[in-house]
Image (tube, helix red, strand yellow):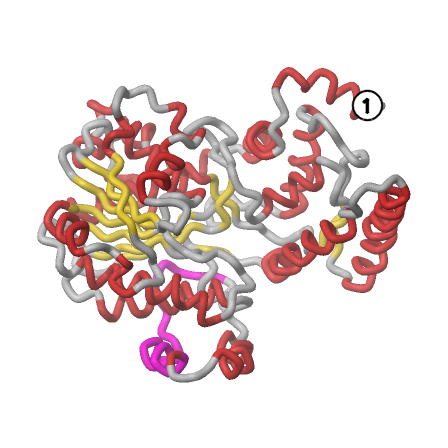
Amino acid sequence: MASESIIADFFQDRSVFITGSTGFVGKVLVEKLLRSCPKIKRLYLLMRTSPNKDIATRRNELINNQVFSWIDQPNALDKIFAVAGDMTLPGLGISPADMQLLIEDVSIVINSAASVRFDDELKDALQTNVKGPRQLLAICQKMTKLEAFVHVSTAFNNLDRDVVGEMIYPSHIDPIKLINFLESIDGDFTRSITKQLLGKSNPNTYTFSKSLAEQILEREKHNVPLAIVRPSIVTAAAKEPTPGWIDSLYGPTGLIAGGAKGFLRLFKCEASCVIDLIPVDYAVNLIIAVAWHQATTKPSQLTVYTSSTSYHNPITIHQMRSFSEEAVTKYPPKEIMWCPSGECTNRDWYFRINIFLTHYLPAYLLDFTSQLFGKRAKMVKLYERVFRAISNLGFFNSHQWQFVSENSLTIQSKMSTADRKIFDFDVRQLNWRSYFETYIQGIRLFILKDDPSTLPQARKTLVK
């Protein structure tokens, strides 16, 4: 099939440098390039080392990941070249020898590295999400064969607008002056002014730092062929590398998994709000298509591409909950705490009272019983950890935005019939009910590690 692909032909004999390759999106990106572009020359992957793990160990850990088990081309993984480095270090911590290799051999750069922790200290978020991409841009300016630099950002920029366009909006803060200022002050003072800096359009340091990175890259790109891709909330694969593939509890996955197990039964959210989800394979396919389009059309202006569903195929939180509950009745987990059910509320007092009665009170009783039998009490601490994570999502679960995503359709119109199938990112064709069946099966298999053979008994247990 790849021989019919214009995009696969483009990547033939070209080398790609990827940051963030060990993350959820990064792994799927690497797998897709190796499987659908089999004649690609080499993938250089930036990886952090540690005293206990050298670069060879880190590479072996990656290539032994389950995500690569669906690649059937012999020796495909031999094309992975691990580059020791760190997005937080000067020059990304890359050795002179590796740097020279990148400068002379790389045609495409894809930056998918990011700290996605919503509660990061501002200085920490800026280090990875702003300074890292800025240093990567400087390296790109030295590359002799560079044809495209694709920076993966987030759709959750400029959240003071109900409709967010595919553009970089002017900021009231000069990003470079702000970075220089924050470098000159200590951590305590930074923490004291963080809320004021974030303002109304940024609920956390993650969205703020990603927005700053876009502004700086736009200002300093000069002749670098830069494009920006903004995925929304990345969720389980719709089709590739296998339907339902997921390896992280990030975002709604943890909530859905907790609801399926009966561990979570009350969610603080506005059920009528549109929640913008994008399957990971749709996001990855757009990233690859953008790299191809950027290199072959050489646009004079920086273009932003939003990978989202709210504009062309919206789904509400109520629909997500309904489809998830339907799917859980068909594909229940092997073990459940209580019968899976979920209630949405945006009333803070109601949420607090009922969380105590339906979650914390039983947890205290279970912990007390465990201690009586000499076992470790863990339920209360587990709930505390879970609800801290959930509180970080509260802003996104009670607001909605429409992220314009017209530029992806422009690229799609220029793709061949074969490429539209191989690198599919047309969210208009996504059937949400069917997708959530796939999603729940993926959570069951890849997150909960429930063997498919346990499904008949799990269904019987659920009925009881």
Specify the segment rendered in magenta.
Answer: 163-182
Q: Nearer the viewer, residue 419 or 224?
A: 224
Tell me where residue 181 sits by quadrant. bottom left
Quadrant where the C terminus is found in the figure: top right
Whether 74 is drawn above or below 17: the answer is: above
Residue for point 13% across, 45% down: 105
> SS class of the residue under badge 1?
helix
200 on left or right of 213: right
Q: Can residue 439 be seen here?
A: no
Decide if residue 93 is in sight here.
yes
Q: Quadrant of residue 420?
A: top left
Position of 85 relative to 460 (above/below): below
318 or 3: nearer the viewer: 3
Residue 423's x, y, as percent?
33, 33
Residue 460, position in %: x, y? 78, 19
What residue is drawn where x is 37% and y is 41%? Answer: 58
Q: In this view, does 307 lie to the left or right of 400?
A: left
Kindly identify the amino acid type of the residue bearing the numbered disc 1. Val
Decide which of 358, 203 is in the foreground and name it.
358
* Residue at image point 45% right, 71% down: 123
Q: Position of residue 4 (x, y in %)?
A: 21, 24
Quadrant (top left, top right, bottom left, bottom right) of the N terminus: top left
Disc 1: which residue: 463
> Does the magenta segment cover residue 41?
no
Q: Would you say residue 175 sits in the magenta stretch?
A: yes
Residue at image coords 46%, 45%: 312
Pinpoint residue 360: horizontal percent, then vertical percent: 82, 52
